[in-house]
Amino acid sequence: MANVSAASRTRSTTPGSISEAEEITEAQLLKDNGDTSFDNEDYGAALHHYSEALKLDDSNVEMLSCRGATFIELGDFIRAQHDVEKILHLDSKYSQGHYLMGIVSDNLYQYKDALKSYLEALALDCEHENILADNIINLMPHFCPISQSTIEELEDMDAYTKLCEMGAILCVMKKYNLSVRVLNAARNLETNQQGLKMKVLLTLANAHTHLKHIEVALGFYQDCLQIAISSHDLDYQTKALASMASLYLESGNTHQAVVYYEHLLDLEEEMHSGKSQSELLDKTWPINFQLALHLNLSMAYRDIGNLKKAIKHAQLYISLVEKHDFKSEMAYSQDHLGQLYDILGEYQTSLQHFEKFLEKSKQENDKRKIASAYGKLGGCYAHLHNWKLSLTYHEQHFNMAHKIGDKPMVIAASEKLGDSYMMMENYEKAVECYEELFSAIKKSDANLKVNVCCKLGKAFKLQNRYQYGLYYFEEALDIADDLSWTEKKNLCEFHMSTILQNSTQMLELEEARKYLERLIPYYEDQKALKVEEDSCTSGDLYEQLNDCYSAVQNVHCKLGNMEQALIYSELQRQKTITEINNHSTKAPQSSFGSHGDRVTMETINRVINQQNCTVLYYTVLAKSLLLWVLQPGKGLIRHYTHQASKDITVGDNITDLTNQMVSSDGGRRRPGMGLDYTCENRALPEKGVSLQRLIKHNESKQATGGSTCATESEAYTSETSTTEYDFNLKAKSPDRQLYDLLLSPVDDILSKLDVGSNVVVVPHKELHHCPFSILKDWNNCHVWQKLSVTYMPCLYALEKVTQSELRYMRQDDDLLYERSRSCMAGMGHLIMSQDTGISKMSREYSSVTSTKADFEHINTRSLSNPRLFKSGAFTNPDLPGNRVHTKPVSRETTFLSIVTNQTKLSTIPSLPVTPNLKSLKPLGSPTGIDRMLSSGTVSTLTTRTATNTDIVTSPNIVAEFKQISSQGYCFVCGCPSLPEMLELHGKPWQPVGELTCAQREVTTIASYVDTSPVTGSDLTKQTFLASIQKATLIHMASWGCLQEGLIVMSPNENRKPGNMPNAESYIVSVEDIVNSQLKAKLLVLSLGWTNHTREYEDQTWLLPSAFLAAGVQCVLALLWPVSDRVLQKFYYHFYKSLQSDTRISQAINDANKILGTEDRDSWVPFVLIGKDVHLDLSVIHKAMLNQKIDKVEKEITEKLQTDFLNPTPANTDVPNKEQMKKNMQEICSTLLGQYNSQPSVIPTLMSLLDSALKRLHTNNLNRETRTVTKDMVESQGGLDLLKLMGFHFQARGCDVDDPYVIFPHSNEEELLLPAYDALRASHDLLQHANCCHCLYELLPTSEEILSQLIDLLSVTKHASEIQLKITDVSVHPLWINPKAKAFICSIGFHQIGRILNFKRTSVNRKLLTSCLQFLVALSSKKSSILLHKLDVSRLGYSPPSEKVLKDGNAPCLSTLYPLILPRNQLTMCTPWMSFVEQNEEMREKMKLSKSKSNLGQESRKQEQDAKIWHTTTSRAQAKSALEKVGQPRSPQRKVKVISGSSVSKCRTPVDQEPKLNNIDLDQRRDYANYLLEHRVNKIVKKEHDSTRKLFLPHVQSTM
C-alpha cells in the first residue's frame, strides 16, 4: 500500500501530469468537439471525442448521454444500453437517461421497458412533453391493435390531450393496466381544460374498477364528481354518480349505493327545473338510463328493507314503461311490483299485479313468464287461504315447467307447492314435495339444499316427528357451518333448540339451552338494527324471537332453574315498554337499566322489596302454565308448573273458559259470542284488518264448499265461526275452573294474607282477558271479597309505578314545605334554621371551620319533613356517638319496615340521602335572625287559611301573605271533532258517525268531578298532551286502537297544511305518551271498542303500559266492551265512591256491588292496571277552587298593577340574554303559526327592526316619525316582539288605531340584529308550509337541541363530503326526538339505513340556509360565523354549569358581610369599623369598587342617551303635528258636510278631525313622561341587578 501511495504522489509531480481544472477544461473541449461532430452527423468523430472525454471523467452523465445518443445514431444499441444503464445508476432522476433508455428498448423490441422509460422521462421532464407523448403514442400499436389513422389523428393534439385520448382508447380495449399508466402520466402535466381533467379521472376510475381496485376507483370518481359540480357539468356528474352507485352496489354496500342513486335523482330534478337543462336531460339521460335508475333504486331499497321507497320507485318504473310503450318491460315491471307487495304482506295488491303480470306474459307468449306468473299467483292465494285456487295455479306452474323442460323452474315449482301445503297445514303433502325437490337438487347447489333441509325439518317438527326433523336440521347445519353462513346456521340452531326443548334428557336440554341463550341476543340485535335503520322487519324475526323466549323458559323450568326462567320471562315482557321509541332518553334511573337489559334476581328482588303486596307472575306456554310467587323480603317463595293436556293448549283452554264465563253471564257478551247488546263503536280500523277478515272469509267459504275468493266488502260483513260449548258437560263453572287452574296452586299463600291485601297479577297472553277478581274459590267466594287484585304488564312497569308514587309523595312534601315557609310572613324557616344550628352568619366567630361543600348540598325541603330529620339522614357518621342509619327515608320506610320485618335492611335498596353536614351544632351569633327581622313583633290574625297558611301582622315589618295552592285537577276529554276524511295508515279513513255516547259520557263525568270537559275542536293533540301532564285524574272517551296504541284527537287545520290531515296531526301514539311527564294518579281509558263481532287481540296492554311508563300510577281499562247503559251506571257509582278518600279497587268493587243489586248479576269487567292508590276527589275539587281563586287574584293584580296583599320585591330580576332568546323563540313560533291569518306582520316587523338598527347609528333618522298599522296592533306576536326589543308606542292625536312608534334608544343584549335575521329567514321559510309547520311544533325548544340542529345544518351546508349517520353523537338525540326529526325531514333529510342523506336540490339548499340563519338567530350560544363557514371549534354544546351562591375562590368580606334579605334586597350587615380588613380583602374590595364605578358610569351614560332620545322623538312628533295643523290654510270655497245639517244647526265637515281637549293633552304628556321614566327605571334596575351579581359570590347567607 505504501508503494502505491508513493507512485501516485510521484505521478502527481511528474512534468507530464495536469491539474484537475485542466482535466475539466480539456474534457469540456472534447465534449464541445463531439457536439460539433454530432451536429454535422459525423458520428464516428463524435464517438471518438466523447470517449476521450469520458477517459478524463467517466462519471459525467451528460457525456455518457451524448455518447449513448451517438451509439443510437450508429445503430449500436447494445453499447448504447450499457452507457444508459450507467447513467441511471449514477443518477436515477436524470430524465435524458430515461429517454435514451426508452429509445434503446424500443429498438431492441423491449416495448414494455421502453414505455416505462418514456413515462419516467415524462414525469421528470415536462419541457419535452410533446416529444415524449409522441414516443408513447407510437409504442401503443405494439400493445394493442390501434390503427395508424388513429395515431395520425392524435398528432395535432397537445401532449395532455394525446395521453388522455390514448388512455381512453386503451381502457376501451380492456388494457386497463396500460391505460392507468398512461393516464397517470397525463395527470402529471398541467392543463386548464376541466373537461379533459374529468375525462382522465373518469377513465382512470373505470380502469381501476375493472382491476378491482375499489377504493382507488372510488377516489377518482369522487374527484371527478367534485370538479363536475364546481364546473356545473351535468354530464360528468351523471357518469360519476352512476358509476359510484354501481360500484357500491357490486361491492355489497347497498346503503351507500342508494345515496348516490338519490343524488342522481336530485340531479334529475335540477335538470327539470330549466328549459335548457331539460333538453340536456333528454340528451344525457336516455329513457333506458331512467328506467335502469328507478329499477336499481327499487331493488336497492328492497335489499335494505325500505319497502315503501322500493314500491315508490317501482311504480315510477312502471309509469315510464307505460309512457314510452316498452312492451318488453311491461310484464317484468308488474312482476317486480307484485313481489314487493308480497314481501310487504299486502297480498291483495300483489295479487292484482301478478294477474297483470300473467296478462302481459300471455300477450308476449312467453311460456316461462306465464309459468312463473302461475306460481306467484298460487303463492299469493295461499297467503289468502284460498287453497283451491292456490293448488290450481301451482299445478299449472308445475306442469308448464315440466313441459318446457326447465329443471330450475321445476325445482321452484315444487318448492312453492310445498310452501302452500305448509300454510294449509297439510304437512304430509309438503314433505312429499320437499323430498322430491331434495332428490332433484344438485350437490353443487348448497344454498338450495340448506333451504330444502330446513323446510323438511320444519315440516317433520310440526308433525311431532322430531327425530326426522333433527336429522335434516343437522344436515343443513353442517353445510351452513362449512360455508360460514351465519343466518342459515342460526335458523338451523333455532329449529333444533325448539325441538330439543321437548326432550326429557338432560344433555339435550343443555344443548337447547346453549343454542337459545346464544340466539336470543343475536335476534335482539337484529331487531334493534332493523328498527334503527327503519327497515321492514319480517314477522318471522319476531316469531322466532318469541319462540326462543318461550323455549328457554321451558328448558330452564325442566332443568330446575326457576329463577333463570323468571329472568327470561321478565326480559321478554318488559320489551313492550323499553322498545317504545325515545323511551330510554326520558326514563329515569331504573334497576333494570335504561333498556331493561340488566334483569337479574337481585334487581327483581329489589323491585319486589319496595312493594307491600304479593306478586303472582304468570307465563303461558304452548304446553304448560308457569307461575312464580314473589313477596317483599322473601323474594321467590314458590314456583308452579301446570302441564296441559295433549288435545288442547293452555292458551286455548284459558280462552275457552273465559268465553264460557262471559257468555254465560246474562245479557253480557264477549266479542264473537253472538249475543247482541248496545255498544258504541270507538275503534280505529287496524292496520291490515281487511286482510285478516278476507282470510277468515275465505276459510269459511272453503269450509262450506265455496271456491271463489271473497272481496273486501264481503269480508267486512261476514261472521267468524266459533266453537259451540255445552256448558252442562262439566260440573264446575268456568270461573271455578279458572280458579283451580290459576289460583288454587297458591291458595295456601293467599289465605294467609289479610283481608283487603293487595295482590299484583302479571298476566301473559290470554291471561290479559281473565277477570281474576271475580273467580270463585271452593267456598263460592269471589276473590275481590278477600283480596285487592291489580294488574301489571311486567315488573319493569311495577318499578316505574313505584317511582311515580315516590315522585308524587315528594311533590306533596314540597307543597307542605313551601306552605311552612310562608308561615309567619315568610320568616318561620329563618328562625327554624337558627334553631337547628344552620347559621352561616356566625362562621367567622366559630372555632369549627366549615367549607362551602358543607352547605351547598343542604336540602332544606327535607328538613320540613320531621320523618326525614328523625330518620338520621342528617347525622354525621364521623362524629362520635352518632349512629349510622342505612334504612331508606321517606314514607316507604314505614311500610317497608312492617312488611319486611324478617329481612335484613341491607337487602333493601336505599334511596338517595342528602349528604350529612359537618357542623350542625349551634355556633353562636352576635345578632339573632328573629331579632334582626323583628319576628317577635309578629301577631297572628288568622291561624289557618284554605291552603293551610296563616295571616299575620307586625308594627315593624311588612308581613308577606302567600297562598300556595295544590296544582292537582281533573281532566275529562273526548269526542273530538273530525273532518269527513283523514289519513290513517297511509290510506283515507272516514269516521263512521258521531260519538254521541262518548259526548254524553264526558259531559256526565265532568259533572261528577266538577270540571269542564274538553271536547270537539278544542281537543287537539297539542292541548291533550299539555293537559295530561298537569292532571291528577284523567278520563278520556274517544276513538282509539288498543292493539297499536293510538288515540284520536281533533286535527288543527290552521297548523297543518293540506286538505286531508295526516296521522301525525291528530293521532296520539305511545311515543307521544312516553315523551310526556305525567303525574296523574288515575287514568280511565274508555276507547278502542267496537260493536263489530271480532276477537280482542290486545295481549300486551300497549296503551296502559305507555301511560304507566310516563308516570301515571294506575290505569282503569275494560277487558271487553259492555253496554253503554251499564257503563254509565258504573261510572256514576265509581266516581261517587271516590268523593271521599277511597282506594281505586274499593271504588270498583263498590260500583259493581251496587250494579249487581240494581241489575241482577250485572258487573263491568274493569281491571286496574298499576298501583292500587287512594284518591280523594274532594281534595282535588278544593285544589281546583284554589287555583281558580289564584287565577282571579293574578288577573286583578295585573290589571291594577298593584298587589294588595304583598309588597313587591325591592329588586326584580332582570331577564338575561338567554331568557330573552327563549321568549323570542315563543314569539317567532307564534308568528309562523299565525302567518296565514296575518301575512303582513312579518314584513312590517322587518321594516321596523331595520329602521331601529339604522336609527341607532344615524341620529337624524330619529327625527322622522313612524306609526304602527292596525294589522300590527291586532296581530298575535307582533307587538310582543317589539316590546321585547324595547319598542314603545304613543297615541297619535285623537287616533289610537295607528300610534307613533317609540324606537328603542339602545340595542339591549344586542338582540335587534338576531331578531331581524330571524324574521328575514322566516320570510324565506314561509314559502315552505311543511317546514314552517314543523318549526312551529318544535319551538320553543332547549338550547341543546338548537345547538345540535345548527351543527347538523352547518356541517351539511359547508362540508357536503362528510357523510352523517343517525348514530352519530350529535345526530342521534335529534333523530329520536319526534319534533326535531320532523323538522329535519322537512328540510330534505331522509334516512337510508344508518346514513342521514340530504336531498341536495337548489330548493332544499336555499331552505337549509334559511333554517340555519333562523336557528342561529334564536340561539344564545352559536355564532353567526357558522352561516358562512364551518368552524370546528364552534361545534358542539356545553351545558351551563350550575350557578352556586358563593364562589369557592372568592374571599370572605368580613368587613362588609353582604346578605340577601327577603324581597331580594342586598345589604351589608357588618357594623361600621367593627373589623380591620386584611390585605386580600382590601384588594377584593378595590376590584368591587372599580367594577361598581364602571357600572355607574355606564348607567349614567344610558340615562343621558334615553333623555336625548326622548327629546328628539318628542320634537319629531310635535313637528309632525305642527306641519299638519299649525300652518295657515287657504279657505275652501266648497266643503262637504255631514247630512242632516241646517242653518240653525252646526255644520260639520265630513273630513273634520277631532281635537284633543286639555285633559287628553295632559294624558298624552303624562304618558310621554311615563315612557321616559320607564326607560330610566329599567336602566336603574339593570344597574342594581348587575351590582347584586357582583356581590353574589361573597354572599354568606340568603334570607
Image (tube, rainbow, N blue to C red):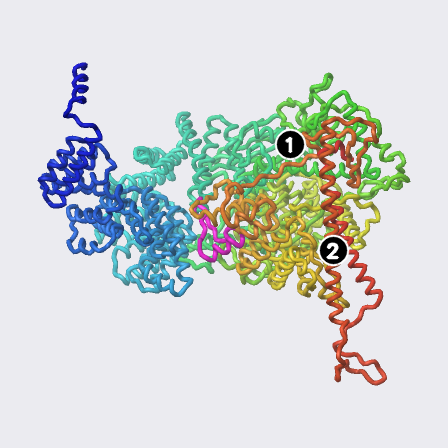
The answer to whether 663 appears left or right of 1582 in the picture is left
Mark 2 or mark 1, which is nearer to you? 2
In the picture as drawn, the residue positioned furthest to the top comes out as 2
Residue 522 shown in magenta: no
Residue at the spot x=52%, y=56% of the render? Answer: 984
At 71% from the left and 59% from the top, the residue drawn is 1302
Give x and y (percent) for residue 151.
18, 53
- The residue at the point 19 percent across, 36 percent down is 28
Q: Name the residue under label 2.
A: 1508
Kindly state the secondary structure of the residue where label 2 is placed: helix
Direction from residue 1150 to residue 625 in the image, left or right: left
Q: What residue type is labelled 1?
A: Gln
- At label 2, the amino acid type is Ile
State how far apart marks 2 and 1 are (Cα): 71 Å
1181, above or below 365, in the image: above
What residue sits 40% from the left and 55% below the top? 311
Label 1, secondary structure: give it.
Answer: loop
Comes first in the chain, label 2 or label 1? 1
* Residue 162 placement (x, y as % from top left): 24, 51
Q: Say which of 91 and 209 sits in front.
A: 91
Query: Magenta segment range?
Result: 1384-1411
Question: Does 549 sit left or right of 466 as displayed?
Answer: right
Please provide percent x and percent y for residue 1103: 58, 46
Q: Residue 1258 location in percent, x, y?
A: 65, 57
Q: Nearer the viewer, residue 435 or 1116?
A: 1116
Q: Quadrant of the N terminus?
A: top left
Q: Is residue 1599 above or below residue 397?
A: above
Mark 1, Cα crowd under 10 Å, few <14 / some 14-19 / many 20+, is many
Regarding residue 320, the answer to whether it shows in the image is: yes
Q: Considering only vertical position in the picture, is 336 above or below 1371? A: below
Q: Name the residue under label 1.
A: 611
Please tell me which residue lies in front, 772 or 1463. 1463
